[in-house]
Image (tube, rainbow, N blue to C red):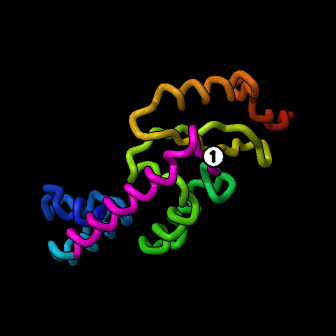
């Protein structure tokens, strides 16, 4: 509700709607259906969830989750259905872990620490609100222990 209400508030002229991607138009149209009461309830939910997340994290130096719920997908996978609602469901299924950190305003970083079929698979480290420094320090230590920046994708076979 918050996201789509924000889209609906954007000053987009009607003649510019054709220039938007299908998922953007989908969010805009959904936002136009929400009332002020819907938005107020959604904001209360976000604030309560943020408090819960921050409280839950307070006893830890960092949280570790996957970055993505699925291995890397072809770009077309997100839009091949042609249905913006389905595209959105796929996006949510692909990235369920990142939204909570964005919503709670906590520092987070994704580090590519593994590979599947030569493609990077990341882990997400999140720290306490306002404590970016310790999180960056932890990320640097992880990168030193497993220097992913030296990895290279496999070369495609040479064609004669």
In the structure shown, which secondary structural element does the residue marked by tag 1 occupy? strand
Which region shows up in magenta? 38-65
Q: Is residue 17 magenta?
A: no
x and y, in percent, of residue 99 in the image: 46, 55
Looking at the image, residue 126 lies above or below residue 46: above
Q: Residue furthest front?
A: 59
Locate residue 114 relative to residue 135 in the image: left or right. right
Q: Is residue 40 magenta?
A: yes
Disc 1 packing (10 Å; few <14; some 14–19; many ≥20): few
Looking at the image, residue 137 lies above or below residue 3: above
Determine the main secondary structure of the stretch shown in magenta: helix
- Could you tell me which residue is drawn at 46 percent across and 49 percent down? 101
- Could you tell me which residue is drawn at 54 percent across and 45 percent down? 59
Looking at the image, residue 95 lies above or below residue 111: below
- Could you tell me which residue is drawn at 70 percent across and 42 percent down? 120
Q: Residue 55 or 27: which is nearer the viewer? A: 55
The quarter of the displayed image where residue 51 is located: bottom left
């Amino acid at each position: 509700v918050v996201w789509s209400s924000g889209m609906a508030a954007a000053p987009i002229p009607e003649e510019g709607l054709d220039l938007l991607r299908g998922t953007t138009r989908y969010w805009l149209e959904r936002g136009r259906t929400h009332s002020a009461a819907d938005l107020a309830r959604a904001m209360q939910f976000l604030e309560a969830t943020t408090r819960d997340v921050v409280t839950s994290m307070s006893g830890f130096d960092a949280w570790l989750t996957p970055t993505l719920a699925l291995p890397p997908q072809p770009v077309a996978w997100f839009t091949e259905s042609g249905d913006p609602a389905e595209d959105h469901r796929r996006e949510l299924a692909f990235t369920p872990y990142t939204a909570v950190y964005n919503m709670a305003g906590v520092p987070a970083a994704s580090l590519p620490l593994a590979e599947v079929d030569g493609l990077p698979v990341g882990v997400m480290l999140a720290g306490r609100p306002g404590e970016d420094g310790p999180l960056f320090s932890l990320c640097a230590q992880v990168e030193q222990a497993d220097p992913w920046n030296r990895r290279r994708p496999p070369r495609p076979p040479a064609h004669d």
